[in-house]
């Protein structure tokens, strides 16, 4: 995979997606960038041209628009060929509560973007990559998917579902030579984490996170937690008995609720 030149990224207009676009553009990649905000995408495309991107094609779409993604994928492959790397990065995070009922639409939206949107991102490319006999399908999950966090029913559950989905997909694509890479970030400096009203250990700047993600992608690792310190935390969380986990996390700080995402 050294010297990969064709990369498709969702959620590309800000945060981790933007940092990954800048990383690959600086290495001359031809890029397909998808995000909801057309103006932000166009601004980014201009910046990428300045750092040496091979070519940049933008697609102002929501990842829950499966027909739109199919058309975007077909257009990108017609222009650039089968991608070397497809990164399903688009995601939403918001505090949610089940008991009131008014958060149900926010819960549905989180699952639609974080789980369905990931599958919709890969769908236009998986068959073509199988035919090409290689490439990387990369899903950005989260350490929040390892144990359920208070006030984050939707986000934790959606990321747990994403991890399981990616594992299934990895098995499906194994014989095709296509690597499926699951990346579980800890805390990364992005607009998504900027609203968190609590301390975030091992917080990484987005450009450094992108560099580390790219290294994981290059290796074709099946699963990685970034940064590595959060990987140790994740392993500990997995083995904590429920009674102890509940005692430690029941009063943990919570992400603010937002009924529209």
Image (tube, helix red, strand yellow):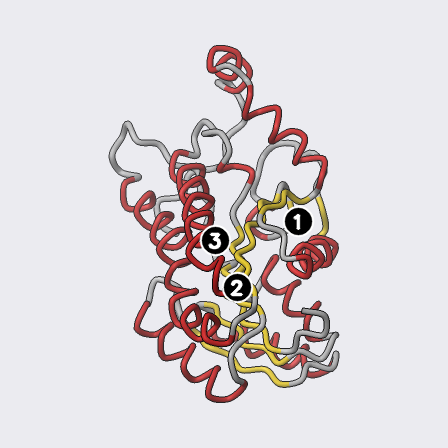
Q: Which residue is drawn at 68% across and 81% down?
A: 53
**What label sits on residue 170 in the rendered view?**
3
First in sequence, mark 3 or 1: give its number. 3
Q: Mark 1 points at which residue?
A: 189
Dot 1 falls on a residue whose secondary structure is strand
Q: Separation of disc 2 and disc 3 at Cα? A: 8 Å
Q: Which residue lies furthest to the front in this view?
A: 175
Between tags 3 and 1, which lies in front?
A: 3
Q: Residue at x 47, y 37 (%)?
A: 256
Q: Separation of disc 3 and disc 1 at Cα? A: 29 Å
Residue 95 rendering spot, x and y as whole percentages: 43, 37
**What label sits on residue 149 in the rendered view?**
none
Q: Separation of disc 1 and disc 2 at Cα? A: 30 Å
Q: Which residue is drawn at 48% across and 60% down?
A: 175
Marks 1/2 in contact by CB < 8 Å: the verdict is no
Q: Name the residue under label 2.
A: 178
Q: In this picture, is 196 found above or below 169?
A: above
Dot 3 falls on a residue whose secondary structure is helix
Residue 153 rendering spot, x and y as whole percentages: 39, 34
Marks 3/1 in contact by CB < 8 Å: the verdict is no
Q: Quadrant of the N terminus?
A: bottom right
Left-right relation of 236 to 167: right
Dot 2 falls on a residue whose secondary structure is loop
First in sequence, mark 1 or 2: give its number. 2
Q: Which residue lies furthest to the left in this view?
A: 101
First in sequence, mark 2 or 3: give its number. 3
């Amino acid at each position: 995979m050294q010297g990969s030149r064709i990369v498709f990224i969702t959620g590309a207009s800000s945060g981790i997606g933007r940092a990954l676009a800048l990383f690959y553009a600086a290495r001359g990649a031809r890029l397909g960038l998808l995000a909801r905000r057309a103006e932000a995408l166009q601004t980014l495309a201009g910046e990428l041209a300045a750092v040496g991107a091979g070519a940049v094609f933008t697609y102002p779409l929501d990842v829950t628009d499966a027909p739109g993604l199919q058309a975007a994928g077909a257009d990108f492959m017609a222009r650039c060929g089968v991608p070397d790397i497809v990164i399903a990065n688009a995601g939403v995070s918001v505090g949610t509560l089940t008991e009131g009922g008014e958060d149900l639409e926010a819960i549905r939206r989180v699952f639609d973007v974080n789980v369905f949107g990931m599958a919709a991102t890969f769908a236009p490319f998986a068959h073509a990559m199988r035919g090409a006999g290689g490439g990387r399908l990369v899903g950005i999950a989260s350490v929040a998917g390892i144990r359920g966090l208070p006030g984050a029913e939707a986000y934790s559950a959606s990321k747990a579902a994403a991890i399981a989905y990616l594992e299934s997909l990895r098995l499906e694509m194994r014989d095709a030579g296509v690597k499926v890479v699951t990346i579980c970030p800890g805390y990364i400096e992005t607009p998504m984490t900027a609203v968190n009203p609590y301390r975030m250990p091992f917080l990484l700047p987005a450009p450094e996170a992108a560099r580390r993600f790219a290294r994981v992608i290059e290796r074709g690792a099946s699963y990685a937690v970034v940064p590595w310190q959060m990987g140790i935390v994740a392993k500990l969380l997995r083995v904590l008995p429920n009674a102890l986990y509940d005692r430690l996390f029941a009063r943990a700080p919570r992400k603010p609720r937002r009924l529209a995402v």
